[in-house]
Amino acid sequence: MTNQIDRNGLVDRFWERKPLKTLSAHEWEALCDGCGKCCLNKLEDEDTGEVALTRVACRLLDDQSCQCAHYETRHSFIPECIVLKPENLDTHAYWMPQTCAYRRLWEGKSLPDWHPLVTGDPDSVHRAGVSVRGMTVSEFDTPLEEWEDYIIEEPV
Ligand code: SF4
Ligand code: SF4
């Protein structure tokens, strides 16, 4: 769910003033911190429903920018890629990364100090060591039966 993020022209700390479901499309998109973690492949325990993130990234994720290489046309390649919206956040929040801004706000938490909306600097998510920059492995080179070896502890 990562794209070039436009954080210009927004009301100061809008996420503290408005409920998630009333945000404009611009505000909603700007909440994304650009970490890239939702583009990691996940393993879900069928019995417990627990979700573990792995370092095995979606084939379209750019490991350096942490952005989707073909965001606008990604569904031609990855039809199952989720379009996260206020209306479906209830359904998806459970598998989102613990640091994800959407999940945190949905849980009633604040945005962390390193969030680009707080710092005004898109690189602050990378400096904080929260993004996937430089830590992913290719899903082409990593057979499914090995994904367990790449599980990461959150928050990373
Ligand atoms: S297609 Fe892959 S890289 Fe692109 S937004 Fe979806 S999960 Fe992320
Ligand atoms: S995990 Fe959340 S904050 Fe990070 S890239 Fe995905 S949608 Fe954005």
Image: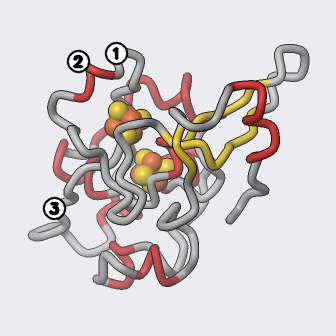
Distance of mark 1 from mark 3, alpha carbons?
A: 25 Å
The amino acid pointed to by label 3 is Asp
Q: Position of residue 129 (x, y in %)?
A: 57, 76
The amino acid pointed to by label 1 is Pro
Determine if the C-beta at disc 1 is less than 8 A from ligand 1. Answer: no
- Give the residue displayed 69% in from the left and 25% down from the top: 144
Cβ atoms under marks 1 and 2 closer than 8 Å? yes
- Give the residue displayed 38% in from the left and 65% down from the top: 64
What coloring was used for the rendering? Answer: secondary structure
Secondary structure at numbered mark 1: loop
- Give the residue displayed 60% in from the left and 59% down from the top: 99
Mark toward the viewer: 3 or 2: 2
Nearest to N terminus: mark 1 or mark 3: 3
Which residue in the structure is indicated by mark 1?
79
Nearest to N terminus: mark 3 or mark 2: 3
Secondary structure at numbered mark 3: loop
Name which quarter of the figure residue 104 lies in.
bottom right
- Give the residue displayed 52% in from the left and 81% down from the top: 113
Cβ atoms under marks 3 and 2 closer than 8 Å? no
